[in-house]
Image: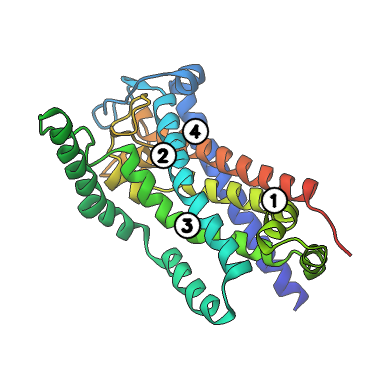
Amino acid sequence: MLGSLIVASSIAILTTVGIVASMLSEAGRFFTMVSPFEFFFGTVWDPRFAAAGSGGASGQFGLLPLLAGTLYIAFVAMLFAVPIGLFAAIYMAEYASPRLRSTAKPLLEVLAGIPTIVYGFFALVTVGPFLRDISTQLNGLVTGNYQNFIQAQSVITAGIVMGIMLIPFVSSLSDDIITQVPRALRDGSLGLGATRSETVKKVILPAALPGIVGALLLTASRAVGETMIVVLAAGVAARMQLNPLEPMTTVTVKIVNQLTGDLEFTSPQTLVAFALGITLFVITLGLNIYALYIVRKYREQYE
């Protein structure tokens, strides 16, 4: 049994090492063709596929437009998901009756089991056209010019739909953390005359805050790595801009684009996908490590 456990653990570790090693080796080949400075600090993404086998380094491989789109869409998604998910967790943990909690919590967590491609279709068919039509009507009422100023594929469309997908992650993780706060703290606060709302605000949330922050960082790493929703809801335009009503794209979308079709792994146009992949890996790994650091450093231990 001990040998089986060691083998299982070794497979998991070696698989991770193999994935990282393969990405590093291919990314190293890419950086022999394209300057790392050009990649990490470039502001233009225009790979311009060369002929098969030419190995030409034509095109521009600036990472910053993709990174800006990734972080922008993830920020909008978190801006939408965090208040709803956190308030839902507080209600489920502190105010809902056991009967309501046993019914509503599983229904809320059903959202986590829906495939992301379904969310993408929902954004493409429903949310995007709805926002576009609403903007057209509002613009017509205000200016008399019935021209939409929100595109169907935009940052806000992808952010809202991704936020809906992230709500159960925020809610479930925060709920587990809030319910782990010792009952003695609640009873002590209520016994001193505090109301239930004051107890939640002054006692429970401060005690659970480190765990909640860690949960939000883990959720943010989930948002950074999302692909299908962004492909269908935010478009493929690689550009740097601050208007959430226009399309942008992310690192994951361009990884898919660069590796789609009958390609040879000999040109920078395909090898750039591995450089993008290792960059995304480092970002998500950093978020996860920082989340664990926050939890371990600031978590209060109760006897």
Q: Which mark is residue 73?
A: 2
Q: Quadrant of the C terminus?
A: bottom right
Taking the view exactly as shown, the residue that stands out farthest to the front is 193
Which residue corresponds to mark 3? 167
Which residue type does callout 1 highlight?
Leu
**Residue 107 locus on image (x, y percent):** 44, 73
Q: For the residue labelled by badge 4, is the local secondary structure a helix, a strand or a loop?
A: helix
Disc with the residue nearer the chain's start (4 vs 2): 4
Q: Is residue 243 above or below residue 177?
A: above
- What residue is at 59 percent from the left and 55 percent from the top? 15
Q: Residues within 10 Å of mark 4 (few under 14, many from 20)?
A: many
Taking the view exactly as shown, the residue that stands out farthest to the right is 303
Disc with the residue nearer the chain's start (1 vs 3): 3
Which residue type does callout 4 highlight?
Ala
C-beta proximity under 8 Å, tags 1 and 3: no
Which residue corresponds to mark 4? 27
Q: Nearer the viewer, mark 4 or mark 2?
A: 2
Q: Which mark is residue 292?
A: none
Q: For the residue labelled by badge 1, is the local secondary structure a helix, a strand or a loop?
A: helix
* Disc 2 from disc 1: Cα separation: 25 Å
* Disc 1 from disc 3: Cα separation: 18 Å
**Residue 123 locus on image (x, y percent):** 28, 51
Which residue corresponds to mark 1? 209
Q: Residues within 10 Å of mark 3 (few under 14, many from 20)?
A: many
Question: Foreground: 249 or 276?
Answer: 249
